[in-house]
Image (cartoon, rainbow, N blue to C red):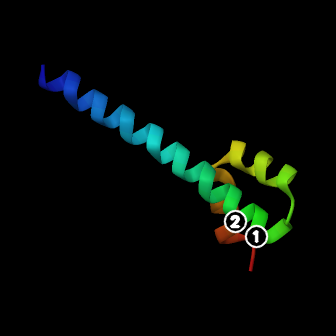
Amino acid sequence: MLHSRNYNVRLESAKYGVSFGSALAMAISYTTNHSILWAIIHGILGWFYVLYALIILP
């Protein structure tokens, strides 16, 4: 029973982490590019774009 609850907590945390990563990527993208289309594309990429923005963009 304990393992099932632990799995649910991890699953929910991962889901919210992905959602937060997508929202953060969209905000960074729109601020940088001023384009809704690019914000949507970067929102799909999520954390990959956030890491790219941290490493590559000034």
The residue labelled by disc 2 is 28
Residue furthest bottom as drawn: 58
Which residue is at 53% across, 44% downward? 18
Dot 1 corresponds to which residue?
Answer: 31
* Dots 2, 1 in contact, CB < 8 A: yes
Which residue is at a point 70% across and 65% down the rendered structure image?
A: 28
Query: Toward which corner of the image does residue 34 lie, by quadrant?
Result: bottom right
* Disc 2 packing (10 Å; few <14; some 14–19; many ≥20): some
What x and y, as percent, mark residue 17? 47, 47
Residue 56 vs residue 43, the one in the foreground? 43
Q: Is residue 11 above or below residue 30?
A: above
Q: Is 25 drawn above or below residue 58 in the view shown?
A: above
Horizontal and vertical percent for residue 40?
A: 77, 47
> How far from the left and from the top, in percent, is residue 39?
78, 54
Quadrant in the picture for the C terminus:
bottom right
User: What separation in Å lies between label 2 and label 1 (alpha carbons)?
Assistant: 5 Å
For residue 10, side relative to residue 34 (left or right): left
Quadrant position of residue 24: bottom right
Element carrying mark 1: helix
Residue occupying the point 79% across, 70% down: 32
Under mark 2, the amino acid is Ile
Q: Quadrant of the N terminus?
A: top left
